[in-house]
Each structure stands twice: as C-alpha cells, then as structure tokens.
Amino acid sequence: MAGLGTGVNLGIGGVAALFFKLKLRLIIGNLRGETARQIGFVFSVLAAVAVAVIGFITMGLVRLAPPDMAVDLVVIAFTMFWVAWAIGPLMMFGLDDTLDPSRVALLPLTTGRLAAGMFTASVTGVWPPVTLIITSGALTGIAVGATGITTGIVAVVLLFALCIVTSRLVTTALSGALRSRRGRDLAAVSVVFVVLLSQLPNLVVNQGSALDVPRLIGDMAGVLRWTPAGMAGHAIGAGGLVALAELAAVALIVAVFGILWIAALKRALVTPDTSTQAAGVRSRSLAARVLPESAFTAVVVKELKYARRDPRGRVGWITAVAVSGVLLFSISGQGGGAAAGAWLVYFPACLSALMTALQSANAFGIDGRSLWMNAVVYGTARDLRTDLAGRHLALVVLAVPLITAVAIAGALLAGDWTFAWSAALTGWGVFGVGLAVGSVTTVLVPYTTPERLNSFSGAAPGQGGIAFLSSFGSLLVTALLALPIALPPLLGAAWWSLLAVPYGLTAAWAGRRLASALGLARMPEILAAVSRPS
Amino acid sequence: MTDAVRTQGLFKRFGQQTAVAGVDLVVPRGSFAGLVGPNGAGKTTTLSMTTGLLRPDGGSIHIDGFDVWQDPVAVKARIGVLPEGLRLFERLSGRELLHYNGQLRGLPKPEVERRTEELLAVMDLLGSADKLVVDYSTGMRKKIGLAAALLHNPAVLFLDEPFEGVDPVSANTLVDVLTRYTSSGSTVVFSSHVMDLVERLCDWVSVMSGGYIVAQGPLDQIRAGRTLNQAFLDLVGASNSGSGSGNGEEGLSWLGSAQA
C-alpha cells in the first residue's frame, strides 16, 4: 500500500489482482499445518468438481424434457442459485476475512476500487466457478441456434454477476447487524430454518402421488420467471425481443444492486460496530427454587439457561422439535394395519428420544473453553457424576415433554389412544439409555462445538472425525442397548413398556458412574479437546 | 513453613516444541509474586499446569504442601484461578456467573449471595451485573473473572495476565482488591508483561525465559539496584548490547518524517 507520498496508485485492475491474491493467501493460510483441514479441503474440491460435472450434465439433460418444461426447470434452477447465493454467505459471515468490509476499512482505497476488490475476492474460491459451470449447462439444455447460444452466454454471465452482487449487497448491508452478538445469534439459529425450508419440496412431493408434478413445476416457474434470476433463465428459451428485454432488465437490476452495494459499503466503512447495549437478564429459575441448593442444582439451572440463551442450545432444541415433527408427518403418510399402527407410534417416539439424547453425547462441547471453571473445582469422581447428573436432569426437563407429545400425537394419528402411554414410557426409557451412552462418549470422545455453526460441520476444524465418531457411535450403541425395551412393545407386548423407565434410569446411572470414573482422570485432556479454537 | 507454591523439574512439550523445560518455581506463603517473561517464555503453560488444568509431562507441583496431581481435592479447595483468554460462561450474567461458581464450590446460598453482592460492588459491576458476560468489555471480564476466583476465599490465587487490556480505573480496582487480599496473609501469583506494575505490587519475582526460570527471589534481590525493567532485559538477554542485528537503525531508514 502507498505510504506518505511514495508508492504507486493502484488501478482497478491492480486492486482486483491484490484482492485475488489476498483471498488465495487466506485459503492457503487456513490450510497450513493442519492435515485434517488439508484433507477436508481436497475432499471439498473433489466434491465441487463432482457437483460441477453432475450439475452441468443435469442441466444439459433438461433438453430431454418437453421444451416448455425445460425452460421452466431452468427458471427454477436459476432462481434457486440466486437465493442460495443471497442466503449462503450470511451463514458464513465471520468465516471469511474478505467478506467483512470493516477489515479493509483502513486501506487507502476509493469505494469503487474497494468494490472491485471485494467483488474479485468473492468470485475467488471453489464455489463461484462451480456455479458458473452448472448454470452454463443451461446453454446445452435449452439454447437453440447461434442467437440462442449468444443470448445464453449473456444470460449466464448476468446471472453470475447477479448472484455475486446480491450476496455482497446482503452481507454488506447487514454487516453491522451481523457483527453484533444478537445478529450473529440470529443468523446461527436461522440456519435451522433454511435447512427445514429446503426439506419443504421433499415433503410436498412425498405427500402427494395425488399432486400433479408437471403442473406444480409449471405453476412455480410461472411465478419465479419474474424474479431477476428467473428472467435470465427465461430469456435463454424465449429468444427474440422478449429475451433482449429480459436481459436488459436483468442487467439493469445488476447495476442497481451494484450501486446499492457501493452505497452500503460506504456506509458500513464509517459506521461503528453496533455494540450490544443489551438489557439485563434476570430470571428467577424455577429449578433453583424447587431443588435443594447444591452444585447439582447450580448445574441444572445453568444448563437450562444455556438451552435458552446460547444459539447452539436453541439450534439443538429447535432441530429436535422439527425433526420429531417431520418424522411424525412422514411416517403417518404410510399407515395401514394394526402392526403398522404400533410402528406409527413407537417408532417416532423412540427416534425422537434418540435424537434428543444425542445432545448429551458431547455434554461439555458447548461449555467449551469455560469448562475450566468446573475442572478447577472437581476433585473427585463424585463431583463429576453430580455434574453429569445435573446436565441430564436439565435435558430430561426439556426432552420428556417433547417425547410425550410425540407419543400422544402418534397415537392420535394412529387412531388408538392405548398406544400413547406405552409409547411415552418406551420413549423415556430409550432416552435414559441415550443419556447413559452420551455420558460415556462425553468423556471419551469430547470435541469443541464451534461458536459459529455452519451446515458443514458441527465440530472445530480437525475434529470432524471425532464428532462423527461421537454422534454416530452413540446413536448406534444407544439403539443396540435400547433394543430390549423398544422391541417387545413394537411386537405387540405393550405391558413391557412398564420396564422401560426403570431400565433407562438404571442405564443412565451406570453410564454416569462409568463416565465419571473415566472422566476424572482425563479432565485435562477433555478440557484441551473442548477448548480448540473454532 | 511450607511454601505456597513449589514446583520441581516441571516439564511440558507440545509436539516438537518444549514449552516448559524444567521449572522450579517457588513462591513463599503470603507473598505477592510476579511471574514475568517475554512472550513464549512458558508462563501460561506453567500456570496451567500448576492449577491442574494441563497435565505436565514431568515434574512435581505442591501447593501449600499438597501435591496437585495426587491430592486434587485438597488443592482445588485452596486455589483460585483466572486463566488466560477470559474464558468464562458467556451466556450467564455476571451475577449468575458468581452464583454458579459459588454453588459449584458448595458454599451455602445466602453466603454466596452476600459475597456476590459485595464483590460486584467493590469491582464496580453492580450496574452491569445482570448483563450477559458475552456483552462485557475486556476490563469488566477481568473484574468478573477475578471476582469468581476470589469468591471462595482461596489461600493461593493464580492470575494469568490480569491487567492485560484493562483500563487504568479498572486496573486500580484490581490492585486495591489484590493488595488487601495479600495483606491478610494470602498468596497471589500473577503473570505480567507490565514491569512497572510488577515493581510496584510485588515483593517476590520469578523471571522466566525460554521455558526456564532464569532468576527468582525477593524483588530487591532481583533488581539489585537497577529498575526491574533493566534487570529483566539484562536477564533475558535482550538489552541494547545484546544479540540481534545491531541497534536496528539501518533497516528502518525511511521511517519518520525526516526527508532523505
């Protein structure tokens, strides 16, 4: 950079080159010295190449559909890309240095040059070229003749620019909010809703053999073709003056978004961080009043607060509720017969128990670096056992109503009330087994739950394998250990579920006993494992 | 009389790098001890091992005569810790954090509440006691961390860089509290880069460099007539006549407003 009087003034091309190199350096620097990350990167590049090839071919295969439907499909695909680009980087904010304009605020650059640089930085990477390749597949899919190809190329380039500029505009305009703690919390929780939303088409399609899929596509495309991305897609198929008008409109929108982005950038550079002047929290916890004063109660109260206040806690519970709902909904679609009735009720209840118990599989993960505060106090296995028991009770307070609700809803859907009590009992028992296994995995395979959740990994860099082992292992072992209480009711012996809760309680107690004995000796190692930078 | 802290041959490696290479740290009971050293000297690693948060590769640690790794119950009841990096339960309010810490240590609830309010008042945190710790500034976090470390009235207090990033007003509060605490016969061990502060507060100094203790003793003995800063630079071998490429003037000829 130029200093006082010396140094050269970089042109727009120079700035673009500089930011290109900066982004490459950041990607490389991120990989240095971490074998696991390097392997992860290689895999994501391979995945990207595969996605690009498959995507390109799929877009080309659209040609096999009737011409009208082919255009409709391209319109829908283009809109999906556009939406993905608008939302995706919001979830990634804070993971990529070139995305936050405040990091470059001190560089002596004009806003226009900065915009050029930031634009270059955001097209540098793995996924932008993938987008470009897949969308060009539409050329082979629906473009007809030389004019068609020309229109197509322009449309694809415009769509690419639209995607990038939109994502820049959204992140820049919201960067103030995203830098604040509350904004980041909100973004983290919103990941769940995006994932759920992406499941919506699945559910809709699952629901209906009655639904007319081609008509559905036609209807969707009829609306989406008026979005900027849809227009770009439509233009390729339309040709002629219509295409020209549509492309001009898209170009205009790109330009407007660009201008808005530069304006937002200017503002973001001089607007300070929205420091969170949070109002106080002062909640009289019910658990604190009901339970006797002890370390146990302290842990229960703290865990319940964390389930509410920490975005990771909220994400966990919202996911549990959502997954239970989706399960009920999709299983109920396939009912019929008395045996099926049992399945309909027991299966969702047990799965819901299994899913919620999974939150105990890495009980120290969310405490993370703060766990030292407990570690510096615990001197005996009994202390650690009390801690685990407190965490378990907090989970029980939240999970038991959920499992009960699933059991009752399942019984309602099956049309047989008698299932409700036995399914609830069985679910609670399975949950207890899950807690038992979870406390052992907590001390044996602990890992850091990153403060920034993203959809790719629930663990700190380099710990993805451990996280997989922990959650997959605990699911598998829990399922196996739960068979003695889950199987007989499924086969018709409803009275057997009376044994489920004692079985679950005994298992959870034994699990805590084993885990505390193992865990106390491993406390420094556990602390190190959950304190990884993420 | 047993020393408050005594380590022998304390040793820790991380991969290829030896972070602590045989440290014999001694802190007499009732002293206000400073652990000083350049970045990477091994101060944080030493303190982490001494407080039982990091497993040493070798050596022994005794606090008030109890072995940290053989007799953790006795040791953990006696120590208070403020580790590096302000690692606190972010989603509790300051008041909740102190309550949690007190109850975890088995103090009776009314006592915890009384001590919490007094500590919050002394630390000047009453106004933000109900804000989440995640929204605290650096100075506030150091103060609430110190309050949490003091809550159970430990015999020995370990503080890793307690004054780093703290404004002068908060630093003054911390100093007042710590001075009062040691004057009653309790022991403070803290690591710091700020020589002036160490010189002003401490009566015992341990100087670390490259994973070793290079000097240790009463402040006046270490100073030997110099300022502590000069003594420190002499000890770690970084004073003007020391190693390195000259006095660094050739390399920075463009720096400053003097025109060539």
Image (cartoon, coloured by chain):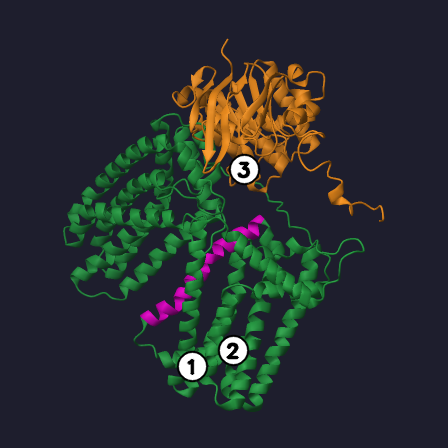
Q: Do circles 1 and 3 both sit on a common chain?
A: no
* Amino acid type, residue under disc 1 in the picture: Gly
Up-down relation of residue B91 to residue B46 (above or below) = below
Q: Are marks 2 and 1 on the same chain?
A: yes
Looking at the rendering, the stretch of residues picked out in magenta corresponds to A181-206
Main secondary-structure element of the magenta-colored stretch: helix
> Tag 3, which secondary structure?
loop
Sequence order check, earlier mark of 2 and 1: 1
Q: CA distance from mark 1 to mark 3?
A: 54 Å
Which one is in front, B21 or A86?
B21
Element at label 1: helix
Image position of A43 with respect to A314: above or below: below
Image mark 1: chain: A
- Neighbourhood count class around disc 2 (C-alpha, 10 Å): few under 14, some 14–19, many 20 upward: many
The label on residue A218 is 1
How far apart marks 2 and 3 lie (CA) works out to 48 Å
Colour of chain A in the image: green
Q: What mark, if any, has residue B93 been given in the picture?
A: 3
The residue at 27%/62% (across/down) is A331
| Residue A235 visible to the viewer | no
Q: Residue A483, percent across and down?
A: 20, 48
Tag 2–tag 3 contact (CB < 8 Å):
no
What kind of residue is marked 3?
Ser
What amino acid does circle 2 point to?
Answer: Gly
Say which of A506 and A97 sits in front.
Answer: A97
**Viewer-closest of B68 and A309:** B68
- The residue that disc 2 covers is A230
Say which colour chain B has: orange
Other residues around mark 3 within 10 Å, as few (<14) / some (14–19) / many (≥20): many
Please check the rendered image and state whether residue A189 is part of the magenta-colored stretch, yes or no. Answer: yes
